[in-house]
């Protein structure tokens, strides 16, 4: 037994090192004084962060990305609430195939989604814009939101709704007084996950970007210039901490939801 | 009319009504575009003018031109390697979290596994370039320690680097379904196997592994299909010999201005991947008996 | 008698091809404690949910207090329900749960407060008003569910297996408390249960259901003492069955040939469900005795003890009768000085014709 658990500890140790290598190196290089991204480290500086503050193009890209991410979060959560509610509460004709189809973007290669949306937009004679990217992002985020919200709706005891109805409330009020407060943590988690995915999405955004870049498209353009790399590291560090912060908030709400409905906490994220 | 009114109040109608916006959105932005890509792949384009006469010429090119054949085969090979590496890496980790971590701390471990995934996608790939590069972290430390004299050159700008980077990107997605499947394995079944005289390894092979197969299958599909569509990783760390079919699709749509050929390549790639995924599922159903 | 509070006539319910309820005709009287008793899947919960308005019947009618409930949704019916899972709103305190229905009726705040306090008092939860509902025990949750429904003063309170989630001791305590509560408020209670003991101890009347049909509606005493069919007799308490064949009827008597017991003349009224189709005779274990020493009985039969189950206050003997393959059960009170027989012992079983029931 002992030998086996030692093997496991080593394995997990190496695995975590492998998994975290980029995430650890990112802030290391962001604070490294050298303008070349490589070892050995030469000293500590916050210069690369201050470079970010004065970069106009970057600010435009960041604003675009925020706009897209917020819109995506709201719309994919809305669509996911409807789908999750429908699939967990009602049995309807073709439910399994409809849900399978709606969840399809989760396994579809992103390049296929990018290509197909590009084709439609060009064939229809529309201009590529931030809207086209938003549409693509809603499409890929909705399945993730459905996954989160389905478990929130599934944990909901059907007799709670019936009890509310039985006690004289209307269906509409039942939704707002009983269902909504109980799935609220799931909705917050869904909003944050969609926001985070959209903020970081590159493949679709690159295909559908018109003249206005998103943050990842901007980063892609800068990767060619070695001189820009240290400040990109700083940008990456900021984004990493923003993402982790948002995820911690999402997880907090998910746990609170679990506590509220009184169900044992077993699952993990997503 | 009465029966229609009754139907309107029925569960089926309410469910369909509720899901219709989501379904409509997916139909409009997924089904319609996919159909248009399929249509496009049977047309031809000469610079900017599109010729809408039906032709299979694009498919003939996609399937007979040695360069495309070669890229397709390489992409498939890389995807299979990535999937295998990811699943073999993910299973012990998922097993560790499910069986060796205290129940209270499992959620924290899962969170720990998913954090690196939220490092910017492009940065992550770029950092692998830094780690694997000629003057990179690995070569730097190995020469510094005196283990090697010359920096290793086989670790960047080739297919190994692509496999490693993609495996790193996808491993959280493989751990989650396997972990969920392992969590569902009734612990008393394993105790029963022990009680009936199975050793640790036999217990694992005869009870735990077959019962967690649905998770392994899900992980395989989740990793295998999207991997073929990545064009950033090959571009950044793959070098000329590490490029994949997606790079070609991107090229056709963007610089080469031959969208119909790009569409044919995309559809062919999807078809091949789907075929392999289905074959894998079929083999599993045929030879591995999981829980029904 | 005044008009029934609930009248069901010709109620049918189909789920696809499956018939969950068939031709339910039933009157429930104002102010009674009525139980729907039957094995799981017999349709009792479906019937209760039809009364509540959660299921729409496929045919037939339902009247509550003389009003047709056709097209009346659950939130407009004068019924309230205690759910099997209690369905306590987890994000609300005890008081908020109890006030939920009153708020829906938009009553003045002062009145809501007073009525909530009164209801919480009534179920014995004083001081728990502000308690979060997920911090309640099973028994307390049930009390909240009761208070929440009763505070609305419904015409009928529907209870869906409310005691099944409680352990045995708490269940017995809640049984008498529910009974006491029902007498105090005078509201008609309709209880669904699969536990025959629960139904017998609590109810004024019971409807026994099998396969979507009502088999018999009667008071507990009649249901136990004079079950109308063999099915009911077997479901409620323990009953021994012997094959029987009707020979002739003359006046108020019927002549039957009974397995092991031979030819007998029984009064017609002992065919509780009518004489048509009767093919067996039933007798309760406590109606039989094992005769000791010089004891005698109206009738007696030689038997052999095949199994002894000792219960402290009672002993149950399985005894084999001549010309009957399966043993029958005799229960004896363990009074002072009574010896417990052993397996294999010969025994004289005493019985009387008046304790036999003719059943179909």
Image (cartoon, coloured by chain):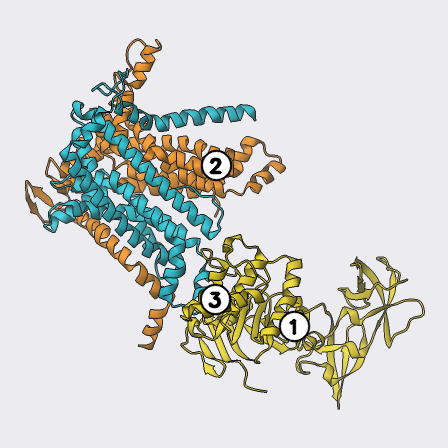
Q: Check the residue under mark 3 and report the chain it is in.
A: C
Dot 3: within a 10 Å radius of its alpha carbon, few (fewer than 14), some, or many (20 or more) residues?
some
Q: Which shade of the palette goes to chain B?
A: orange
Task: Give the residue pinned by disc 2.
Answer: B105
Q: Dot 1: few (<14), some (14–19), or many (≥20) neighbours within 10 Å?
A: many
Label 1 secondary element: helix
Q: Is residue C211 above or below residue A76?
A: below
Name, please, the residue furthest toward the bottom: C251
Chain C shown in which color? yellow
Residue wearing tag 3? C113
Chain identifier for the cyan-coloured part of the image: A
Residue visible at 72% across and 69% down?
A: C239
Q: Position of residue A95 (x, y in %)?
A: 35, 57
> Between C61 and C150, which is closer to the camera in this rendering?
C150
Spatial CA distance of label 3 from label 2 is 44 Å
- Please tell me whether mark 3 sits on a helix, a strand or a loop: helix
Disc count in the image?
3
Q: CA distance from mark 2 to mark 1?
A: 54 Å
Labels 3 and 1 touching (C-beta < 8 A): no
The reply to the same-chain question for discs 2 and 1 is: no
């Amino acid at each position: 037994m002992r030998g086996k658990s030692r093997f496991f500890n080593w394995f997990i140790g190496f695995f975590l090192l492998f998994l975290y290598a980029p995430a650890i190196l990112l802030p290391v290089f962001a604070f490294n004084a050298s303008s070349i991204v490589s070892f050995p480290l030469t000293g500590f500086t916050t210069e690369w962060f201050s470079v970010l503050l004065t970069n106009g193009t970057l600010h435009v890209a960041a604003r675009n990305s925020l706009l897209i991410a917020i819109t995506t979060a709201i719309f994919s959560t809305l669509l996911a609430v409807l789908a999750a509610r429908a699939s967990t509460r009602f049995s309807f004709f073709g439910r399994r195939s409809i849900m399978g189809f709606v969840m399809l973007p989760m396994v579809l290669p992103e390049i296929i989604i990018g290509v197909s949306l590009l084709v439609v937009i060009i064939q229809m004679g529309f201009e590529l814009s931030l809207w086209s990217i938003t549409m693509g992002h809603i499409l890929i985020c909705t399945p993730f939101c459905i996954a989160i919200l389905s478990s929130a709706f599934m944990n909901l005891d059907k007799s709670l709704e019936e009890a509310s109805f039985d006690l004289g409330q209307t269906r509409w009020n039942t939704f707002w007084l009983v269902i909504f407060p109980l799935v609220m943590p799931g909705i917050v988690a869904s909003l944050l996950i969609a926001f985070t995915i959209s903020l970081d999405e590159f493949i679709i955004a690159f295909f559908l970007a018109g003249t206005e870049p998103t943050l990842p498209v901007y980063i892609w353009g800068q990767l060619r210039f070695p001189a820009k790399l240290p400040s990109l590291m700083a940008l990456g560090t900021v984004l990493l901490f923003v993402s982790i912060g948002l995820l911690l908030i999402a997880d907090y709400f998910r746990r609170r939801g679990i506590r509220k409905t009184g169900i044992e906490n077993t699952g993990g994220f997503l | 009319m009465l029966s229609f009114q009754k139907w309107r109040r029925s569960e089926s109608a309410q469910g369909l009504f509720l899901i219709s916006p989501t379904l409509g959105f997916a139909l409009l932005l997924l089904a319609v575009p996919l159909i248009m890509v399929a249509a496009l792949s049977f047309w031809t384009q000469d610079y900017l003018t599109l010729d809408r006469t039906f032709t299979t010429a694009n498919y003939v090119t996609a399937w007979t031109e040695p360069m495309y054949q070669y890229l397709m085969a390489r992409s498939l090979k890389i995807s299979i390697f990535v999937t295998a590496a990811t699943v073999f890496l993910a299973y012990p980790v998922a097993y560790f979290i499910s069986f060796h971590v205290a129940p209270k701390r499992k959620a924290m471990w899962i969170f720990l596994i998913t954090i690196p995934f939220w490092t910017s996608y492009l940065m992550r790939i770029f950092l692998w370039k830094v780690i694997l590069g000629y003057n990179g972290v690995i070569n730097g430390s190995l020469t510094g320690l005196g283990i090697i004299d010359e920096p290793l050159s086989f670790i960047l700008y080739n297919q190994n680097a692509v496999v490693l980077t993609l495996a790193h990107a996808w491993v959280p997605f493989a751990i989650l379904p396997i972990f969920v499947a392992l969590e569902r394995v009734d612990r008393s079944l394993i105790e029963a196997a022990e009680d009936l005289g199975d050793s640790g390894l036999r217990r694992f092979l005869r009870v735990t592994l077959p019962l967690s197969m649905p998770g392994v299958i899900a992980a395989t599909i989740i990793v295998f299909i999207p991997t073929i569509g990545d064009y950033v990783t090959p571009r950044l760390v793959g070098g000329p010999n590490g490029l994949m079919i997606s790079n070609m699709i991107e090229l056709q749509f963007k610089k080469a201005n031959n969208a119909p050929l790009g569409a044919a390549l995309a559809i062919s790639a999807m078809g091949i991947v789907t075929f392999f995924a289905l074959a894998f599922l079929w083999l599993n159903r045929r030879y591995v008996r999981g829980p029904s | 008698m005044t008009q029934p509070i609930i009248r069901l006539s010709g109620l049918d319910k189909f789920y696809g091809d499956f018939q969950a309820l068939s031709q339910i005709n039933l009157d429930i009287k104002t102010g009674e404690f009525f139980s729907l008793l039957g094995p799981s899947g017999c349709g009792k919960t479906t019937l209760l949910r039809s009364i509540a308005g959660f299921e729409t019947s496929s045919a037939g009618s339902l009247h509550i207090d003389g009003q047709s409930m056709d097209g009346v949704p659950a939130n407009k019916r004068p019924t309230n329900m205690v759910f099997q899972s209690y369905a306590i709103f987890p994000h609300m305190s005890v008081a908020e749960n109890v006030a939920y229905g009153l708020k829906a009726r938009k009553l003045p705040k002062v009145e809501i407060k007073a009525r909530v306090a009164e209801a919480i008092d009534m179920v014995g939860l004083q001081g728990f008003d502000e308690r979060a509902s997920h911090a309640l025990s099973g028994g307390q949750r049930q009390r909240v569910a009761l208070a929440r429904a009763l505070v609305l003063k419904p015409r009928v309170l529907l209870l869906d297996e409310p005691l099944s989630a409680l352990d045995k001791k708490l269940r017995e305590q809640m049984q008498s408390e529910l009974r006491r509560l029902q007498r105090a408020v005078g509201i008609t209670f309709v209880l669904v249960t699969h536990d025959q003991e629960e139904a017998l101890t609590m109810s004024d009347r019971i409807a026994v259901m099998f396969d979507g049909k009502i088999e018999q509606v009667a008071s507990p005493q009649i249901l136990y003492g004079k079950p109308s069919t063999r099915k009911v007799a077997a479901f409620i308490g323990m009953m021994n069955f012997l094959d029987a064949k009707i020979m002739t009827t003359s006046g108020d008597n019927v002549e039957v040939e009974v397995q092991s017991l031979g030819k007998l003349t029984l009064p017609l009224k002992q065919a509780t469900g009518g004489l048509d189709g009767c093919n067996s005779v039933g007798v309760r274990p406590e109606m039989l005795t094992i005769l000791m020493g010089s004891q005698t009985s109206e009738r007696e039969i030689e038997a052999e003890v095949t199994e002894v189950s000792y219960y402290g206050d009672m002993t149950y003997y399985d005894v084999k009768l001549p010309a009957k393959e399966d043993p029958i059960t005799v229960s004896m009170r363990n009074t002072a000085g009574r010896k417990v027989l052993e397996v294999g012992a010969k025994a004289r079983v005493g019985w009387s014709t008046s304790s036999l029931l003719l059943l179909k």
